[in-house]
Image (cartoon, coloured by chain):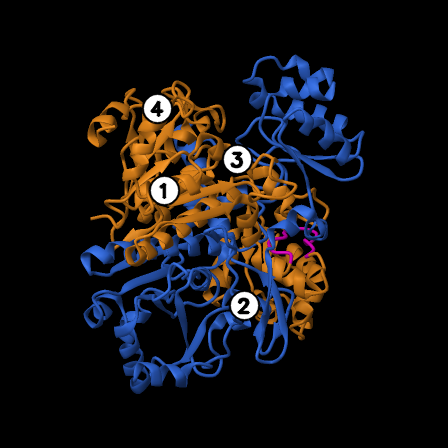
Chain colours: A orange, B blue
Amino acid sequence: MRPLEGITVLEFSQFMAGPSAGLRMADLGARVIKIERPGSGEAGRKIALKNLFLDGSSLVFHTANRNKESYEANLKDSEDLERVKKLIEKADVITHNFRPGVMEKIGLDYKTVQKINPRLVYATVTGYGTEGVWVKKPGQDLLVQCMSGFANLSGNKNDNPTPVGAAVSDIITGTHLVQGVLAALIRREKTKKGAWVEVSLLESTLDLQFEYLTTYLNDGNQIPERTERGSANPALGAPYGVYKTKNGYISIAMGSVLKLGETLNCEALLEYTNSESWFTNREDIMVILRAFLAEKNTSEWLEILEANGIWCSDLYTYKQLLDHEGYQTLKMDQKLNLLSGEEVHTTRCPIRLNDERVYSPKPAPRVGQHTEAIIKEFNL
Amino acid sequence: MRPLEGITVLEFSQFMAGPSAGLRMADLGARVIKIERPGSGEAGRKIALKNLFLDGSSLVFHTANRNKESYEANLKDSEDLERVKKLIEKADVITHNFRPGVMEKIGLDYKTVQKINPRLVYATVTGYGTEGVWVKKPGQDLLVQCMSGFANLSGNKNDNPTPVGAAVSDIITGTHLVQGVLAALIRREKTKKGAWVEVSLLESTLDLQFEYLTTYLNDGNQIPERTERGSANPALGAPYGVYKTKNGYISIAMGSVLKLGETLNCEALLEYTNSESWFTNREDIMVILRAFLAEKNTSEWLEILEANGIWCSDLYTYKQLLDHEGYQTLKMDQKLNLLSGEEVHTTRCPIRLNDERVYSPKPAPRVGQHTEAIIKEFNL
């Protein structure tokens, strides 16, 4: 039995943050029913990476919405709305990411819905919270990475601010939504009452930087500086970073510069006897390391460094990674068979339970695929 | 009542992934007791950003371990170990990130501990899982970002692989640990049985890339390419990216290149009538935009673009962000008063519950600060 079996989630959420939360709850055994507008369905069906579409929806939609059902409803139609309210009576969780005010207009805001189902956990995602000057600003991953200061943490000193090329704001927010929902479900066992759980892309992306923000707030409001080249964490001393080798790259994490100097037989490093200089003189140390590490292949360096317990790694492309025995041991892949006959090759839930990997091969639904069955089942 | 009140977590975890999970459970109301080695305590006490320490532990430790207690125990001492086992009898959750084999030697592996307390949720963090060629490799954030392919998603085309300058692998793994633990606690209400929840930095960091990996696996194993400049997501078409303006930067998210051309009055963009070209000709489009956007200040562009519903944002430094009315509305800050009299200024939990922000001003413990009280309370 998967841990969330018996929990029903109605997902009004669109795009990535909310649906990624629904995906994880589905992975863990919840029944997740997407409430989709008739015809076009969830807006995320049209958001594609590399313009890749299958069976009318983007490939990204297919992986983020696997293992869910779809119920078609026009929330502006009173008959449809009544049915949805009946469904809410029976549900455990709702998630949505409408802008503040939209659910109030429809009559599905927390206060109203709480009366229909006091045990409901009502979970909302916004861009920037529910009040203040940014309330109407689009809650979108790149914008939040840029506004939250997160884009200043990656890349090198003279680079533009460098956002992460993946939807980390969306995804971290989705993980916080799941945390809040599950915690509220645990409390419900005792109190018999639901809760309102709110997350926002901005607050979650600030939390992702809690180490940095804390450093900033306690260190005279100084901005962490990226290093000239190979920057991997502006607030850490050398050798922390990425270095070019003769045939590729190598990363070296935190550790003693002296031990590194001895291990590499690199005399210039042995002058940095004061460990504070590893931070204050990090640019000089990195210059020495760049020149030194360019002389041999990555695998030669790894062998020397690993034998001496220094934390380092190769930098793999997806091809190198997926071909590697270490990756294959994980058995991370799974395949979904779409109604169209097409196949989606994707990854599984990252959490293992009782020593078993969690796969969910059920594909994402077509818009309204389960409407009729759900109407019958719940007698709507 | 906070949702996890009544839940006791024993945190054997060190560094960031496990402790960040403990922090979130403490935020949500759990009682989190760190089990620390006598004297030096958790290894994370010595890991600092910018060499910042307060009261003998790093500033980062103070924020990641706020709102926890500390119980000192030498797990190699039989008397201490017996007491810890008694504590485990009464606990709901254990987390640890020892390398595979260590807890087996001590006699606190899942199978053994399950006999002491069948209701226990036993949660473990590893670097790369519990088997295979990488089992002995250090599970460290930078190394995992580099090995997992994640470092290839950020930065520009001709840059080195660019890791994110924050511990995103650790933190995303910690969020998955919390998800697994809370889901297992929900099931426990029905089954009266605990569970073993496992996460690894590598699997969690692969999951963070699930959109990309899925794209790669279904698109002829092609590597997503970063753009020449302003790259913000290698797999999205123009205008998605970051652009220099006359006095700073601006980000523009996904949307119609034609609408953007009309809004900006930028004729060169109007030639891209085929929406597929927004991806295939993205470098050309970005060249046009770079030249065009350099002509005015960020605020002027934002005014024009926002008035026309185009998704865009400024790029704030921490100073600009923290001074902004939009940030101040969030009330994201809190202060912790240490026993030493020093103060730590940090951020709060990103999840809001029943329309209330969650603050936890209790500071991180000193090593063993609560040992005596816990021995008495639990009659160890």
Q: Amino acid at mark 2?
A: Pro
- Which residues are the magenta region? A224-234
Label 2 Cα neighbours within 10 Å, binned few <14 / some 14-19 / many ≥20 = some
Toward which corner of the image does residue B338 lie, by quadrant?
A: bottom right
Q: Residue A115 shows which numbered tag?
A: 1
Q: Which residue is mark 4?
A: A80
Q: Residue A305 shows which numbered tag?
A: none
Examine the rendering and report whether any part of residue B129 can be seen: no
| Residue at 31% across, 78% down | B84
Q: Earlier in the sequence, mark 3 or mark 4?
A: 4
| Residue at 52% across, 52% down | A298
| Residue at 67% across, 14% down | B270
Using the numbered discs, state the Cα–Cα distance from disc 3 to disc 4 in whole angstroms.
Answer: 20 Å
Question: Is mark 3 in CB contact (under 8 Å) with mark 4?
Answer: no
Question: Is A107 left, or right, of A144 in this rendering?
Answer: left
Q: Residue B361 shows which numbered tag?
A: 2
Q: Which residue is mark 3?
A: A101
Q: Nearer the viewer, mark 2 or mark 3?
A: 3
**Chain ID of residue with mark 3:** A
Label 3 Cα neighbours within 10 Å, binned few <14 / some 14-19 / many ≥20 = few
